[in-house]
Structure formats: C-alpha cells, structure tokens
Image (cartoon, rainbow, N blue to C red):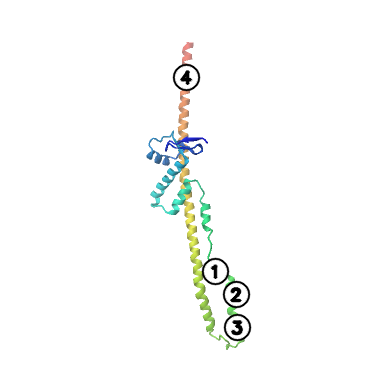
Amino acid sequence: MKTFTSDLSKQDFPLSERVSAQTIRHSVLELIQKDHPQFTHESCLALSELNQYRERALTDYLSREMGELTDLEKMVMRSVTKNSTLTDKLDGTDDQTFTFGQRVADKVAAFGGSWTFIISFGVFLFIWITLNVYWLANKGFDPYPFILLNLILSCIAAMQAPVIMMSQNRQEEKDRDRARKDYMINLKSELEIRTLHEKIDHFIMHQQQELLEIQKVQIEMMNEILQQIGQQGAKDL
C-alpha cells in the first residue's frame, strides 16, 4: 500500500487520505498554521488530521454564536466533520418499546376522542334514561334524577381523564423530541451551507490566482516574441 508522510505530524498515512493544503478552507488553514507555522500551501496532511481541525473550527464558530455547546450540537458537529448523514441516527431513536400502561393509555385516548365513543355512549345514555323513565315508570333501579348514572359518569370521567393526560404527556415528549431533531437537521444544514460558501470562495480565489499565473506566462511569452521580432528586424536592416 502506498503511503505518504504528513507535514503536520511527520507520520505515514495511506496515500488515499492525502489532502493538499491548497484545497483546505481558509478558516481551517488558519487554525492549522496557528499550531504549526511551518505548514504552508505546498504542504499536505491526512484526512483524519484535517477532520480534527474541521471540528475545532466548527466548535469555535458555534461557541461564538451560541456559547457552550450542548450534546445535540456536538452530535451535529461530529456529523459535519465526518461527512456522515444525520437522519439515520435520528430515526434510530424512534425505535422504543412501549409499556403495557402506555399502550393502554394510547388506546383509551384514541377511543375516547373518537365519534365511535361519542355515539355509543350517547346511545347508552338514551337507553338508560328511556328504560328507567318509560319502561320502569320512573320506579326502577335508577329513577330520576338518575343518581346511579351520575355516579357511573363521574367514575368514568375520573378514570378516563388521567389516562388521557398520560397519553398527552407522552405525545408532548414526542413533539419535543421531534423539535430537537428538526433543530439538529436545521443546524447541520446551516453549517453545511456555510462550509459550502467557504469552499466556493476558496475555489474562486484559487482559480483567480491560477489565471493570474497564466496571464504572467502569456505576457512573458509575448515579450519574448516581441524581442525576437525586434532582433529579427534589426538583422534585416
């Protein structure tokens, strides 16, 4: 396997990890030259070494903008420096096993907030009232004002309300988790766009320097041609 020697650490790395200093963004290159003043545009380093300085550059930028970094921001930063995707890591957090109580709470909340529950419970109330008032002539087991029915309704409400609140609290946790994921994705997009702008600026500056070098060579060639023409003209005279 072919290797090269890094000008940064003087260690050997695979040739496939070689990165030229001319392709490094200006902000990252400044950090490298701050620690290693001998590192010039003609030097090279390994990709693993470059990722360390990329992470430092992003850390400095986020620290200036937001202060102390959170665990979410550190995860985004590592994803940017390693050029890895973030969605696969976020999707994996949804795979959680629900307890029996959580499943019951979800089913109760889903059924209690549906038209099926409203219609069926309305039919139950209608049958209860009709049975006691008309069929049993208001002398049955629950005559008007339906004290037993009120007790049953109070018990159902007392049991149903906390179960629905449990489901709503867990739904709020899902919403907060979804908001954290959206924040991480948006933050990574912002960092990627900023990095892309720096790469474009670096590419334009590098291209302009190459054009200037080409123009210098062309001017030198034209001067040589003019000198040759002048010398040839002097000979002819």
Toward the viewer: 144 or 167? 167
Q: Residue at x 47, y 54 (%)?
A: 183
Q: Residues within 10 Å of mark 1 (few under 14, many from 20)?
A: some
Kindly report the distance in space between the C-alpha atoms of the residues bearing marks 1 and 4: 93 Å
Q: Which residue occupies the foreground of this view, 77 or 99? A: 99
Q: Amino acid at mark 2?
A: Ser
Do tag 1 and tag 3 residues touch (Cβ < 8 Å)?
no
Element marked by disc 1: helix
- Judging by the rendered image, the residue that carries numbered circle 2 is 120
Could you tell me which residue is drawn at 50 percent across and 72 percent down? 161
Name the residue: 49% across, 55% down: 182
Q: Is residue 199 left or right of residue 36?
A: right
> Distance from label 1 to label 2 (Cα)?
20 Å
- Disc 4 + disc 2, Cβ < 8 Å: no
Disc on the earlier residue, 1 or 4:
1
Residue at image mark 3: 130
Q: Residue furthest top?
A: 237
Mark identifier at residue 104:
1
Q: Which residue is mark 4?
A: 226
